[in-house]
Image (cartoon, rainbow, N blue to C red):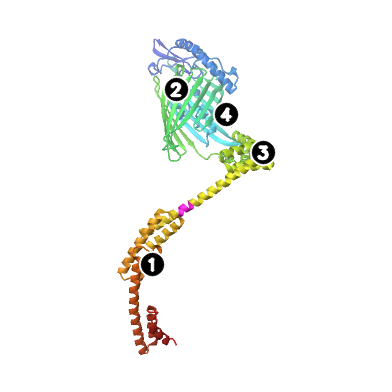
Amino acid sequence: MFNKTSIHQFWERGERGRKIKIFPLHLGGRSQSSRWFPAWRPSTISRAPTPESHQPRGRQRRCCEGRVRELIRSLVSVVFLFPSFSFGAFSSDDAGTRGPALLKKPVGVRAVGLGGSFVGVADDASALFWNPAGIDQMAQPEILFMHADSFFDQTQDFIGYVKPVWWAGERRTLGVNVSYLSIPGFDVVEDEAPVDRARPSDLAVGVSYAQPWRSVHLGATVKAIRQQGLDSTAQAYALDMGLFAKPREWFSWGASLANVGTALRGGPEPIALPTVFRAGFGHRIMFLSSRPGKDTVLLTGALEAPWDDGIAPQVGTEYSRRWGTDNRASVRLGYRGGSQAHTFDNGAFAIGAGIDWRSFRLNYAYRPHEALGAAQFLDLSVRWGSPLAQETKRRELIQDIQDHAAAGDLAKAQASLKEALALSPRHEPIRRLDQTLRQRFADSLDPATLFASGQDAFRRKEYEKAADLFRKILVIQPMHKEAADQLAKTETVLANRRLAQLKEQVAQAQRKEREDIVRSAVQDMDRQRWAAALTKWKRLLTLDPNHVRAQTGVEECLKGIYQEARAAEKDGDLTNALAMYHAIQRETPSYRDVSKRITAINAGQKDKNAKEGLEKYTEGVQAYQAGDRDRARTLFEEAHRLLPDDKTIQRALDRMNP
């Protein structure tokens, strides 16, 4: 609080040593009464030039800065439509004297870490100070607590609360904040004797409101200000106005005009409020493609033009890394330019860091000062609840309208639009979509428009859409010859296209079937199931007689069957060997020596059958002679099976079956 915005001080040497004469701190330094404070030694406060020493520098700056300030004031007047008589002309006489100091103290530790360039970002509850329009982008209720310690043992506290609501078919945002600035109490002495106890302080209470308007957001804050001085209390009322827009997900901008209102009254003389204009932007950069949405760099810039001091450019950057769903860690670096000696706010760097954990956010910032020491800031914010259900529903409906319109399904788009208009009839994006759909419906009944759209669809090879458009023309104008010709041409292309697609589908099915046969046949060959593999290779050759793999597969299977037949023949399994030789012979009659093998096996089998047949016949005769007719019959039947042409065995069997 003891800063050059509110203090004029000078030194005097008397018989009793050095003393400091300090005018009342919060009343702009123009009080008619003064008191002595010997308890404060000069060594604790940097020497400042006398008020007279400020005059030359103020006059030098006035010439080069006056035109710029006048230009900015004109722009502000146009933008905010505020009467020009509300702003006094800038002069070096009132440089840095407007108060109270509380209205010049930054709020929000994240903003401090970004060098104060927060008016174009304004995405947390500290937007109540920087740009009240920014609170309209907050999806959930939030409360923010801030505490700061700076030079002269000043303590600053801030609490802000923001809540989005749904009213009259639109999202609105309400906010309230309380700011308090004070120093520890001290004794007031006069003639080296304590006469009073003082604790100067500033208090501001504000109520905010924000809502969208077309493609931007508008916001305002009405606040009451009370200033407690050494021996008096002053009050004032002020208005903050803001404008915020986010045309892209990665870019936003904003502007605000703060502390426009009545002068502080209640002290020795009225003190004007420190009106200030701010404008800035925020640009977000996503990088590290391996972690999309995880790593973000925010670049900010702003220009601050106070009515009682020099213009201050501000820049800042923030790097954030996210882990999990709702957790994030951030580091910040900011710089505030300019040379505002009257406010102790010379250009200086600030650093900061923050962590988001679930719904909690903790931020810290550190801002050094060459003469007065460092200032430290700490805040904690909490978010809770869910986004407004109506806003979420509206966002989903807008996406549905856009998707259906892009797909050409105007009926479904119109149905979603009706639902969106019922939910939020004055929402600007919905109204624009309504106008677009109305125009598209009107164009859809104009034959010339339909014909042009059909030709465009035909050129893009969207033949189904083109055919539908040409058919619609013929419904409206049955004698439209060009539409009929184009429809015939389109249907021919569609027929050829469908035929080609059908052929391609058949070819794909055949290719898949062949691939499946090859895979299955190879598996059978790996397991030495030669007969099953041979059957599959023959089926594949039926589908594709020139299939090279099937031809080689048949050869490999015949070779495998032949080797198994030879092995069975050596093992005496002539029946199995003969079956395999016959299988080879059916496929390739002249394969190796298969015919000779079959002849040899048949001859040997015939001799074997004759020998076994005679043995069975002899056993049958013996059984018959022994009177065992059933066994004799069985033996004669086996002998007849082995020697079907033997007449003796046939007669014996006939005798057993009278």
**Residue on which the image places disc 2:** 336
Q: Secondary structure at mark 1?
A: helix
What span is colored magenta in the figure?
508-513
Of pointers 4 and 1, the one earlier in the residue sequence: 4
Decide which of tag 2 and tag 1 comes sooner along the chain.
2
- The residue closer to the viewer here, 42 or 260, is 260
Residue bearing mark 4 = 218
Q: Are marks 4 and 2 in contact (CB under 8 Å)?
A: no
Q: Which residue is mark 1?
A: 582
- What residue would you read off at disc 3? 445
Q: CA distance from mark 4 to mark 2?
A: 26 Å
Look at the numbered disc 4 and give the secondary structure of its residue.
strand
- Counting residues from the N terminus, which is met first, the one under dot 3 or under dot 1? 3
Direction from residue 474 to residue 380 in the image, left or right = left
In this rendering, which labeled residue sits more in front, label 3 or label 4?
Answer: 3
Could you tell me residue 404's position as x and y percent?
A: 58, 41
Disc 4 marks a residue whose amino acid type is Leu
Q: Which amino acid, mark 1?
A: His
Q: Earlier in the sequence, mark 3 or mark 2?
A: 2
